[in-house]
Amino acid sequence: MRKFTEGLVDTETIVEALDIQPGQTIIDAGCGTGYMSRIFSRVVTLSGKIYAVDRDSYFIEKLSEETEGGNIEAIQSDIAQLDGLDDRIADLIYAATVIHALSRPQLTAFIKEARRLLKPDARLAIVEIEKKETPFGPAIENRTSPEELVEKVPMVPLKTVRAGDHFYMQVFLNSEK
C-alpha cells in the first residue's frame, strides 16, 4: 500500500503560502486519496474547479463517488499525459511527493504538460521530503533538495516553504528562467 502525506504536511501553511482564491482552477497531480483536493475545493468554492489526478483507479473511483456533484473532477491518468484537459486552464498545479518517483524523462514530460496546462504566470507547487535522514520516505539518493529541484525545473522559482516536519514546498512561476 502506498504511503500518503495526509497528517504529515502542514495543510494550513501550504494553502496560505499558495494564496489560493475563490474561482481558481487547481490540478492536484498525483492526488492519492484526494485529501488536498478536498481542502483546495473548499478554498476555491463552487466557483472554482479541482482536477484530482492519480494513476490508481481505486482512489479515483472512491474520490469520484465521495465528491459527486461538487467541484472536484477525479481523473485516472498519468500526470504527464492529461490529454483530456484543455491548454492553459490551471491557476495552480500541486504535486506532493511524486517528483522523487519520476525518472528524468518522466519529469521532463510532466514539466512539459504542466507548462501546457498552466495559465501564463500561474504556479507549480511541488512538495517533497527533505533530502536528509527521516523516519519514512524513499532512500536519500532518490530525494531532491530544493536547490536540486530548482535546477531540474525550468521555471522561475518563487519561494521555498517548510511544509511540515521533513517536508518542503517549492513554488515556481510558469515563466522562463
Image: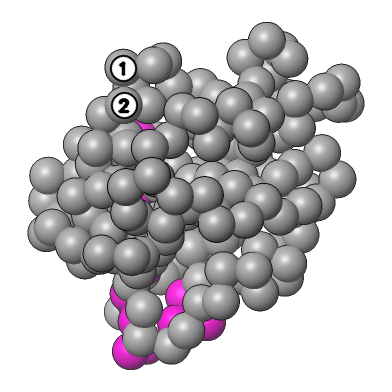
Dot 2: within a 10 Å radius of its alpha carbon, few (fewer than 14), some, or many (20 or more) residues? some
Dot 1: within a 10 Å radius of its alpha carbon, few (fewer than 14), some, or many (20 or more) residues? few
Q: Quadrant of the image for the C terminus?
A: top left
Residue 123, horizontal then vertical, whole percent: 42, 60
- Where 36 falls versus 22 (above or below)? above
Q: CA distance from mark 1 to mark 2?
A: 5 Å
Magenta residues, start to end: 41-55
Amino acid at pointer 2? Thr
Instruction: Give me the residue at 38% from left, 37% from top.
Output: 154
Residue indicated by mark 2: 108
Residue indicated by mark 1: 105
Residue 163, horizontal then vertical, whole percent: 74, 53
Residue 162 appears in the figure: yes
Residue 114, horizontal then vertical, whole percent: 29, 46
Tell me, yes or no, whether the two marked residues, 1 and 2, touch with CB atoms within 8 Å.
Answer: yes
Amino acid at pointer 1? Pro
Which of 63 and 151 lies nearest the eye of the viewer? Answer: 151
Instruction: Give me the residue at 27% from left, 58% from top.
Output: 118
